Image: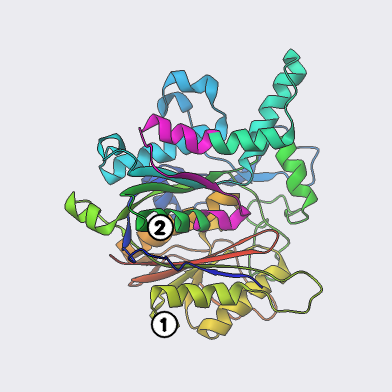
Amino acid sequence: MTELLERPVGTARRTCVFTGIGVTAPNGLGTAAWWAATLAGRSGIAPVTRFDATGYPSRLAGEVPGFDPAEHIPSRLLPQTDHMTRLALAAAQEAIADAGVTPGDLPEFSAGVVTASSAGGFAFGQRELEALWSKGGQHVSAYQSFAWFYAVNSGQISIRHGMRGPSGVLVSEQAGGLDALAQARRQLRKGSALIVSGGVDGAICPWGWTAMLSGGRLSPVNEPDRAYLPFDADARGHVPGEGGALLILEDAAAAEERGARVYGRLAGYAATFDPAPGTGREPALRKAIELALADAGVTPEAVDVVFADAAGVPELDRAEADAITAVFGAEAVPVTAPKTMTGRLSAGGASLDVAAALLSVRDGIIPPTVNVRGRGEGIRLDLVTGARSAPVRTALVVARGQGGFNSAAVVTHA
């Protein structure tokens, strides 16, 4: 098992805080709309409209509603961007405005972009394939499609906002949103002042749909309120979605100097990788949680809520529940999975959970896990199924990526 715990070399452990949030989610476009819908338990999961999915066994998705790219990005960028990049640009614009900062006014090379992606290349490649078929365009390989998408996504944000500092893209599926934030924290500790980070992702297109079906984790249930039921006795898989959150991370001293409003602090992070199948060794999620808590300098008793990965696959749910129970005790900490209202957003899911954690800290309320009625065998979690008012000063966000990735992040009050 490989364990990755951030240990800066030759740099002070500078405090890194969140000062801006931008959201494009299936149950709300924009942070305010998404958060209101989330607290109300309103789901954005519905039959796919982005393409004709009637011939597929899984036909539900979380699609961002009412998104008109012309309202969010300059017209000159429309021909150069695909749907996912446009959603990312909209989220970045909102986050930057929310932070009350103009990155181009900061010292040169002090502001950058570090994002996560894993599925958006499918939509980008789908567009290229359609151009090839309809116009006899130049052949584009799958590898080129993904590479171009990752570069375009973060690069367009950098160019639009005059951010010439550190840049990068993390690819670790659903865990990527946390891994990107950790990389942003590393850059801040190296001297950067501000990083736009998180993930906006999705693959709601025929090519992406076929790839996700081949993974064997999509729910075959096509009733929106019964399709995605993590930790439930009736769990049969997950529903995919598109969107996510981009966040502004700043050095705390720089944020204080400019009088920024602070949502909270990225206090701890760790990542592990599961051992190879058949080795008989334990999954590594518990270790990621323990290392993240140690990095934050907090005990399990200090955690007020856990935002779960919530795979919706019985054996994976059981493994996550076992890890949480091993660290905190049976039903000892509230656990929630608001992604039951959006579907799993690939690399965008974990950063959206971080946004929810920050707003939980701000508002003193834990968002619900919707539609779950009963626990699966051996699941001993205090699952929050209705919005719960409670003081939240420390939140743990857990994410797992298909293939063995585990990440955990601790978010605290400022």
The reply, left or right, for residue 123 in relation to residue 384 is: right
The structure residue drawn at horizontal position 37% and vertical position 60%, both measured from the top left corner, is: 358
The structure residue drawn at horizontal position 32% and vertical position 58%, both measured from the top left corner, is: 17
Q: Mark 2 points at which residue?
A: 185
Secondary structure beneath dot 1 equals loop
Q: Is residue 91 above or below residue 3?
A: above
Task: Inspect the magenta stretch and tell me whether residue 142 lies in it.
Answer: no
Work out how far the residue at label 2 is from the one at label 1, CA to CA, in angstroms: 22 Å
| Numbered label attached to residue 188 | none
In this rendering, does residue 368 appear at all? yes
Residue 86 position, x and y percent, is: 50, 32
| Residue type, numbered disc 2 | Arg
Which residues make up the magenta segment? 152-178
- Mark 2, mark 1: which one is toward the viewer? 2
Task: Inspect the magenta stretch and tell me whether residue 176 lies in it.
Answer: yes
Q: Name the residue under label 1.
A: 299
Q: Which residue lies furthest to the bottom in this view?
A: 329
The reply, left or right, for residue 142 in relation to residue 65 is: right
Residue 247 position, x and y percent, is: 40, 49
- The first of marks 2 and 1 along the sequence is 2
The reply, left or right, for residue 391 in relation to residue 357 is: left
Q: In this view, does 240 lie above or below 83?
A: below
Image quarter (top left, top right, bottom left or bottom right) of the N terminus? bottom right
Depth check, front residue: 88 or 337: 88
Count of numbered badges drawn on the protein: 2
Residue 407 position, x and y percent, is: 55, 65
Q: Is residue 217 above or below residue 196?
A: below
